[in-house]
Amino acid sequence: MMHMAQDQDPEENIDPWGSLQIEDYADTMDQFGIDPMEKTGEKLPQQHRYLRRGIVYGHRDFGRVVDAINNDGPFAMMTGLMPSGEFHFGHKLVADQMIFYQELGAELFIAVADVEAYVTRDMDTDEMRELAIDQYLTNYIALGLDPENVHFYFQSEGSPHYNAMSKYFSKHVTQNEVEAVYGDISPAKTVSALTQAADILQPQFAEHGGPKPVVVPVGTDQDPHIRLTRDIASRFKDQDFIKPAATYHKFMRGLQGGKMSSSKPNSYIALTDPVDEALTKIDRAKTGGRDTLEEHREKGADIEEDVVFELLAFHLVDDDDRLRDIHDQYSSGEMLSGELKQIAKDELRNFLEQHQEKRADAKDRVDAFLS
Amino acid sequence: MMHMAQDQDPEENIDPWGSLQIEDYADTMDQFGIDPMEKTGEKLPQQHRYLRRGIVYGHRDFGRVVDAINNDGPFAMMTGLMPSGEFHFGHKLVADQMIFYQELGAELFIAVADVEAYVTRDMDTDEMRELAIDQYLTNYIALGLDPENVHFYFQSEGSPHYNAMSKYFSKHVTQNEVEAVYGDISPAKTVSALTQAADILQPQFAEHGGPKPVVVPVGTDQDPHIRLTRDIASRFKDQDFIKPAATYHKFMRGLQGGKMSSSKPNSYIALTDPVDEALTKIDRAKTGGRDTLEEHREKGADIEEDVVFELLAFHLVDDDDRLRDIHDQYSSGEMLSGELKQIAKDELRNFLEQHQEKRADAKDRVDAFLS
């Protein structure tokens, strides 16, 4: 499963990111027929660290997207966001992939899932709009997204054709299929599933140039939507669709272990957190350090339990050699959790200071983009 | 139930339209809580023959609409059409009501239910568009509809807000409620029910001036949609809605008895039928004439079975005194079915010739309206 930087000896490909719980993902892949990313991802002209480190670990039909990239053919990346709070490092995982694909030539489609949020989570539409722009879009641009060639839209404001298609798709789906996606069914969930299918297939509508490879980067939990949309794509006969491709990524855990969640501010670091506050969150984060210095020196850190190392691997250390050194020193007991946290804090301070400066410029670009 | 012209003695109010099977409708009204039209309709400043003759026999909340009319307040009429073929006298029943309400000051909303037709009946969207314009809209205008102040739209081309609302409404409806409307359930039926609710409530959206009385003239079979939409209107909290009113009309039977249906050309007379062809359809229509002249003279016609008389009552004879004379002569046996048919043919020829001339002008107005 692991795929390290290509200049390294395969023999040395130990798995320094055991914490990513790859075994669980392997089961899921077998069960649903998700293909491993490794060999297909290798053919890309660039290797993002998410690919090198198996964070993006699986795919469906991604080969078509790779072929388009390598042959300068048209392709698109589509993603959706449900603005539930501050933009944090969990969200950055998808933002980084947007920017990666944009640099590789993708046309980007970003749907603000306000209809879904309203009907399934009772969220306030005005508040969502504010968050989507001030938190998500502004941070995307500060991270490097070029708003040119990006279709950033609210589901509630889609074009008539997009809306009609989301309704036409109802003809090609059964009650049982919608129920399988959510585990239960309601009119609201039916509408959500159909709207999401329209989001994913919209890059292939005639007004966007017709059929083309489209990649949707998702967590494994979103795979039922991908499968439903692929089924709709092949059943819909009034226009041709290429079945959308997907890549599957692992999720970073919350800072206290467990799930990272917008509703638990101590579980995440927001990209707009004041730097000092963010550093304090690192101080309080769960590590794999042992109970005593003696035990730590003897056994080394339990890296699987260490969310600070996870933060370095996902976001703060891009250089593989450096990450490997940190891994080796920490797992051997040579490095203490306090020292690991200091590395994380230095990197985080550096990142946040630069990012928050970039946000100022990004705000101007957002205003220009929206008008 | 019968309501005759107001200058007649109530004592004389026999029921000359027994053929309208009023008893069946009375049961339905009791069952679903539809109020009789008679007393509420009387308060209108004008009495259409459909009201005078109990063809529009029941209502929900129509009093609010009457009040708006009598106080020059804003109100709207909303209706939908599913373009399944030629525009015939069955469709004219709703068209006449549109024009009646427009003359009384209504803003009109006419939805072409192309999304519903596509997802539930597999109809071709291009063909529907052609029929909706060339058959429905053109005939509406030839019948007297003034395209000013009319919102004639296709469900597939509704505004973003209309589409968003059709999806937001999903939050306020259960699976069981959708199933109750149709007798069974599917994603396509869920989408149809929600889209129809958006059609009915659209006249009250902010962009159309907010809450106002709205009347939807329907056949009794459409009442489940009205009830569902009224429930949604009262459950939706992000904007105020006045529960939409409805009136309920009887259907004219097909020319051979049984149901008038677009898929059986001999069951209807289209407003674009060549006159000779239309007259032949009258010749072949089912009557209430007796088997022998002797029996007919003795018993009189069985008016309940006579679809030609029904055509006169619904469409071809507007004058109540004249219709009453015809009724009395025919039911006494003084008039033969051939003579009744001759009256119908004369009136029909006259109507169709004039109407088809008006269609030529109407086509120009349609072109202007659409551009």
Image: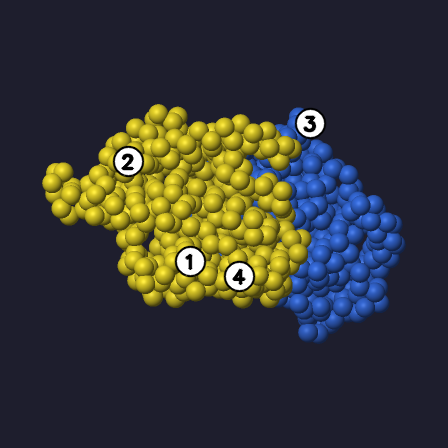
Chain colours: A blue, B yellow
Q: Where is residue A351 in the image (x, y as percent from the top left)?
A: 83, 55
User: What residue would you read off at disc 4?
Assistant: B66
Q: Residue furthest bottom?
A: A292
- Nearest to the eye among marks 1 and 4: give it: 1
Residue B33 seen in render: yes
Image position, residue B50 (x, y; %) = 41, 51
Task: Report which residue position mark 2 lands on.
Answer: B341
Which one is earlier in the sequence, the residue at label 1 or at label 4?
A: 1
In the image, B283 versus B77, the foreground residue is B283
Q: Where is residue A296 in the image (x, y as percent from the top left)?
A: 70, 68
Inter-mark Cα distance, 2 to 4: 37 Å
Q: Which residue is drawn at 53% across and 27% down?
A: B360
Distance from the alpha carbon under mark 1 to that under mark 4: 21 Å
Residues beneath discs 2 and 4 located on the same chain: yes
What residue is pinned by disc 3?
A72
2 vs 3, front mark: 2
* Residue that label 1 marks: B7
Give the amino acid type for the residue marked by disc 1 in the picture: Asp
Residue A295 to residue A227: above or below: below
Tag 2, which secondary structure? Answer: helix
Q: Which of marks 1 and 2 is in front?
A: 1
The answer to whether tags 2 and 3 share a subunit is no
Chain containing the residue with disc 1: B
Q: Mark 4 lies on which chain?
A: B
Q: What chain letter is assigned to the residue under label 2?
A: B
